[in-house]
Image (cartoon, rainbow, N blue to C red):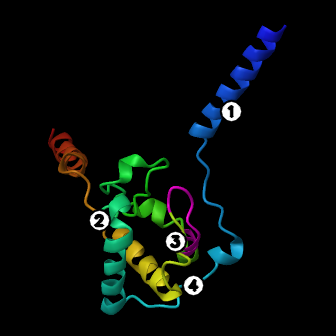
Amino acid sequence: MRKILLACTLILIFISIGLGAFHKTQWFVPPEEKARKNPLTTSEANITAAKKIYEDRCVNCHGDTGKGDGSEAMMYDPAPADLTDAAQMSKVTDGEIYYQITQGRKPMPSFKNRLTENERWQLVLLVRSFAANPAPPPPAKSSEAPTEKKPASPPSSHR
């Protein structure tokens, strides 16, 4: 009986560890935080200031261009966000980005006491700029679809 109880206990422990390791939770951002608007405007001064902060505090995880491919990115689970993903970034408000920078969530640290409110809002502007000019898709993908469609229709109309 003890062996069965021990085996069941071990199975439950392994299941708990497994679920904990593979369960990825979304950020919970309170509605009032989501609704916050950035009090700063995009300007060269704000972006330049944010780039310095980003290089000091963020580049090791999020990478030089915000792709989430920094030198330390592979060490973390969940992996750092790809800030160049325009589709994903269009789903989050400035308030959400600000909240995430402010509060952090393992493995990302909280910057509430490390950066001023103004610096965090400047980072929101920079993060937005990464997705505003996403890298073009690889040439094979972007050139295959248009060239296949355009040449295919003229030959069929000439026949």
* Secondary structure type for disc 2: loop
- In this rendering, is residue 100 above or below 32? above
- In this rendering, is residue 147 above or below 81? above
Q: Identify the main secondary structure in magenta.
A: helix
Which residue type carries mark 1?
Answer: Ser
* Secondary structure type for disc 4: loop
Q: Is residue 98 magenta?
A: yes
Which residue type carries mark 2?
Answer: Thr
The residue tagged 3 is: 101
Residue situated in front as seen by the camera: 153 or 125: 125
Residue situated in front as seen by the camera: 25 or 77: 77
Which residue type carries mark 4?
Answer: Lys
Q: Residues within 10 Å of mark 3 (few under 14, many from 20)?
A: many
Mark 3 → mark 1, Cα distance in angstroms: 30 Å
* Secondary structure type for disc 3: helix
The magenta region covers 96-108
* Secondary structure type for disc 1: helix
Measured as percent of width and height from the top left, residue 106 is found at 55, 56
Q: Residues within 10 Å of mark 4 (few under 14, many from 20)?
A: few
The residue tagged 4 is: 37
Task: Report which quarter residue 126 is drawn in.
Answer: bottom left
Residue situated in front as seen by the camera: 150 or 51: 51
The residue tagged 1 is: 16
Measured as percent of width and height from the top left, residue 98 is found at 54, 75
